[in-house]
Amino acid sequence: MVRILWNEMVNEYRLARASIKGKSFVMVEGRTDRALWTEFIPDQFAYLVYADGKTDIVDAMNTPVMRGIEGVAGIVDADYWLITDADELGTENLLYDAHCPDLESLLLCSPALKKVLRNHLYNYNVDEIHAFADRLACNAQRLAAEFGYFRLLNHLEDYGIRFRDFDVSEVIDPDALRLDRARTAKRLAQTTAAVSCEDLLRQVDALRKSYPPENPQICRGKDVVAILAYLLPLRFRAEFGDALPQNVTVALNGRALSIGLRSAYDSAYFKETSLFNCIQSWESTNTPYKILKPEI
C-alpha cells in the first residue's frame, strides 16, 4: 500500500489497471485506516491505496478517469457531512457509515473498549470493568460533543480555527466531568482572527438549539479517545479507590488506546455496522469485484 494525493491517485489507477485486473481499487483516508482495513480487505481481492484525507478521495473519484468505474471504491469518514447532508456523500462508489462519523466512533460503538480494559485490568471483576467502560465512554462522548460544537461551527463557517495543537483535556474538569466552554472559546479564538471569543460562544449556543447534544455525530472520535485516555486514570481512582497501574497508564494513553481499540475490533462487530451493509451493496453492484474477506 502507498500514500498518494488525488492527482497521483488517478495516475496510480491508470498505471495499475492492467496489473490489478480482477482486483478492486480501494482508497482509504490514511495510515490508521490502512492499519484497520488490512485486517478485513485481503490483497487477493483489492489493491489498496491510502490518501491524505477524504477530500483527495472524492476529488479523484470525480475525475473522468475514475467516475463510475466498476471495481473502484473509496472508504471514508463522513464526519460532519452526515450532519450537513453534504453533496459529496452522493459521490458514486463512496462508502461510509451512515451513523458513525469516523473510524474511532465506529470502534467505540462496539465492545472493543470493554475488551481492551478487561485485558489490562484483569485483576478486577469483569462485570465491574465493563460497567466502568460504559460510564467512561458515555462521559467521554458527552464531553466530546460539547467540544464538537466548536468543530462543527468551524466546519460550517470556515473560520480557520486551528485544532491540531489543542489538548481538549486542558478544558475538562475531571471531577465535575464538565467542559469549560468559556475557556475553550477563548483558547480557540486565539488561533484565528476570523471570530472573537464572544461570537464563538454565542454561535455555539445557537448550534446547540439546532443539534441536540445527544447526537453522536457531533463528536469527533479522536476527541472521544483523547478524553477517554485523560479520564481513565482519574476516574479509575475515583471509582475503584486504586491508582491505575503505571504500565496500564502507559499502555492506554491517547495513541496507544487508539491502537488497542483497533486491535480489539473484531469482524463480528463490523458486521453490525451500516458500513458493512454499504460495502456488501457495493459488491453486489460491482460483481465480480470484492472488497471484504469472504469469512466476514
Image: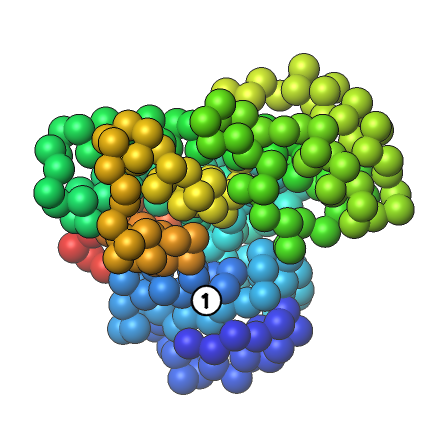
Residue visible at 73% across and 42% down? 187
Model colouring: rainbow
- Amino acid under disc 1: Arg
Quarter of the image for residue 183 reads top right
202 above or below 105? above
Quarter of the image for residue 90 reads top right
Disc 1: CA contacts within 10 A as few (<14), some (14-19) or many (>=20):
some
6 above or below 227? below
Residue visible at 39% across and 27% down? 138
Q: Circle 1 — which element?
A: helix
Q: Position of residue 292 (x, y in %)?
A: 29, 57
Name the residue nearer the viewer: 204 or 168: 168
The residue under label 1 is 31
Residue visible at 42% across and 76% down? 1
Q: Is residue 112 left or right of residue 216?
A: left
20 above or below 158? below
Q: Position of residue 91 (x, y in %)?
A: 59, 49
Quarter of the image for residue 81 reads top right
